[in-house]
Amino acid sequence: MPQDNLIKLECTVCRKLNYHSKKNKKTIKARLEMNKFCKQCKKRTPHKETK
């Protein structure tokens, strides 16, 4: 798995890094945002891509 395609997803509520994912940065320029389960908040919250 190439390292340049890896992204980190951070919870927008508690600011904890919960997930790692892959993204094709050549085709998708915008930052990714999706609803994921946060173990800290114990509910589904929006997670945004970080640097």
Image: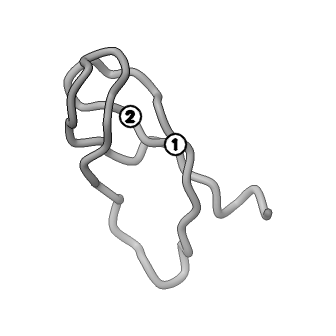
Residue at point 28%, 54% (across, down): 33
Task: Report which residue position mark 1 lands on.
Answer: 8
Q: Residues within 10 Å of mark 2 (few under 14, many from 20)?
A: many
Question: What SS does tag 2 mark?
Answer: strand
Mark drawn on residue 50: none
24 horizontally vs 10: left or right = right
Report if the CB atoms under discs 2 and 1 are less than 8 Å apart: yes
Q: Quadrant of residue 44?
A: top left
Q: Residue reaching furthest right?
A: 1
Q: Which residue is mark 2?
A: 10
Is residue 26 shown above or below 44?
below
Crowding at dot 1, Cα within 10 Å, few <14 / some 14-19 / many 20+, comes out as some
Q: Position of residue 43 (x, y in %)?
A: 21, 28
Q: Nearer the viewer, residue 21 or 36?
A: 36
Q: Check the image and name the residue furthest to the front.
A: 42
Which quadrant of the rendered structure holds the N terminus?
bottom right
Q: Nearer the viewer, residue 15 or 36?
A: 36
Tell me what residue is drawn at x 65 percent, y 63 percent.
Answer: 5
In-front residue for pair 16/4: 16
What amino acid type is highlighted by mark number 2? Answer: Glu
Quadrant of the image occupied by residue 36:
top left
Q: Residue at x 31, y 36 (%)?
A: 37
| Residue 27 against residue 3 in the figure, above or below | below
Side of 2 where 29 appears, left or right: left
Q: Is residue 8 above or below residue 21?
A: above
Q: Marks 2 and 1, how far apart in space?
A: 7 Å
> Which of the pair 34/31 is nearer the observer?
34
Q: Secondary structure at mark 1?
A: strand
Residue 16 image-quadrant placement: top left
**Rendering coords of residue 42 (x, y %):** 26, 20
* Amino acid identity at mark 1: Lys
Residue appearing at x 20%, y 24% in the figure? 13
